[in-house]
Each structure stands twice: as C-alpha cells, then as structure tokens.
Image (spheres, grey):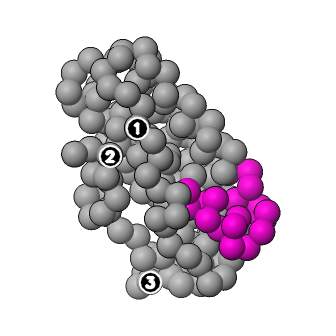
C-alpha cells in the first residue's frame, strides 16, 4: 500500500470516528433522539468497513478513536442538527478528495459507499432535523447566502489528529 493510501485511510477513519463521537455526545446530552441514534449506528458500521483495510494490509495498527469526550456540546437539538449537517458536508468533501488518492478498487468501493451514505442518507436527515432542507435562504443559524457556517476541508483542525 502506498503512503498516500495509508494517509487517506487514516483521514477516513478519523472522520468516521469524529462523527461517531459527535453524534454520541448529542445522544448523551439530549437523549436517544433521531436522526442521531440511527446515524450513530451507521457511523459505527462505517468504521467497521474501514478497519479490515488496516488489518488486511498490516501497514499499521488500527488507531483508537481519540474523539470521545473531545467534541463540542450543543445547547439545543437544532444546533446539534446543524453540526450534523456540517459534519456530513465535510465528510462528503473528504471522500471526494479520497477518491482521487488511490486507484485500488477495494478502497475506492468503500470510499464511494461511505460518501453515498453521507450524501443520500445522513445529510438529508440532518437537514430535516435542522430545518434547512430545500431552503435556499438557509435555516436556523444559516450564514450569509444560506450557508450554515461551512468550514472548508483544509481548515478542519481535526483532520490531522491521527496523522502525525
């Protein structure tokens, strides 16, 4: 496995770990509310899709999730839903980049599946939860132009956390 592919896998796993910890934190604060309960399970499945790639190539041990207890708290369910929208948008951007990082079909197939889950299932669920779905003017907390405060992929402080 090429170094760039290993780095890509670390980024993918870190992003899935971060999303899992974020949604777990929301459930701890606000109770077992949808869509967080459903998507928390999906994020755990996403991690399980990535783990065999580490184990199969024995390039490095599977890193532990560094995120539990390290993510933000949310004063309301709406702010938590907006954070879910943001997390899924970053995830979609990340997988778009990762799809250019390898030619290995086994890795690409997993990246495509995980990106599709974010685009077609998770993002719409969080948009409905936040009240921003299909609203060109934005919803609660929307920034200028209806942008709910998106942060670009390269600006995400958490991305390099597992890659040192």
Which numbered mark, 2 or 3, is in the foreground of this view? Answer: 2
**Which residues lie in the magenta part?**
21-39
Write the residue at 79% across / 63% down: 32
Q: Identify the element where label 2 is drawn.
A: helix
Task: Identify the residue position indicated by label 3 in the image.
Answer: 143
Q: Main secondary structure of the magenta part?
A: helix
Q: Residues within 10 Å of mark 3 (few under 14, many from 20)?
A: few
On residue 63, which mark appears?
Answer: 1
Whether 121 is drawn above or below 3: the answer is below
Q: Position of residue 106 (x, y in %)?
A: 44, 17
Distance between mark 1 and mark 2 Cα atoms: 7 Å
Q: Is residue 95 visible?
A: no
Write the residue at 40% across / 70% down: 150
Distance between mark 3 and mark 1 Cα atoms: 35 Å
Q: Identify the element where label 3 is drawn.
A: loop
Q: Do the CB atoms of the residues marked 1 and 2 lie less than 8 Å apart?
A: yes
Image quarter where the N terminus lies is top left
Task: Identify the residue position indicated by label 2 in the image.
Answer: 162
Q: Position of residue 17 (x, y in %)?
A: 49, 48
């Amino acid at each position: 496995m090429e170094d760039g592919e290993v780095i890509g896998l670390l980024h993918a796993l870190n992003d899935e770990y971060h999303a899992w910890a974020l949604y777990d934190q929301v459930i701890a604060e606000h109770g077992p509310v949808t869509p967080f309960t459903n998507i928390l399970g999906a994020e755990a499945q996403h991690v399980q899709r990535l783990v065999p790639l580490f184990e199969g190539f024995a390039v490095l041990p599977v890193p532990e999730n560094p995120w539990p207890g390290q993510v933000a708290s949310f004063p309301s369910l709406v702010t938590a839903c907006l954070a879910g929208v943001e997390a899924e948008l970053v995830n979609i951007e990340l997988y778009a980049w990762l799809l250019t990082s390898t030619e290995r079909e086994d890795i690409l197939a997993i990246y495509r599946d995980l990106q599709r889950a974010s685009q077609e299932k998770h993002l719409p669920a969080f948009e409905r939860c936040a009240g921003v779905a299909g609203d060109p003017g934005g919803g609660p907390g929307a920034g200028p132009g209806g942008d709910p405060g998106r942060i670009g992929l390269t600006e995400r402080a958490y991305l390099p956390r597992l890659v040192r």
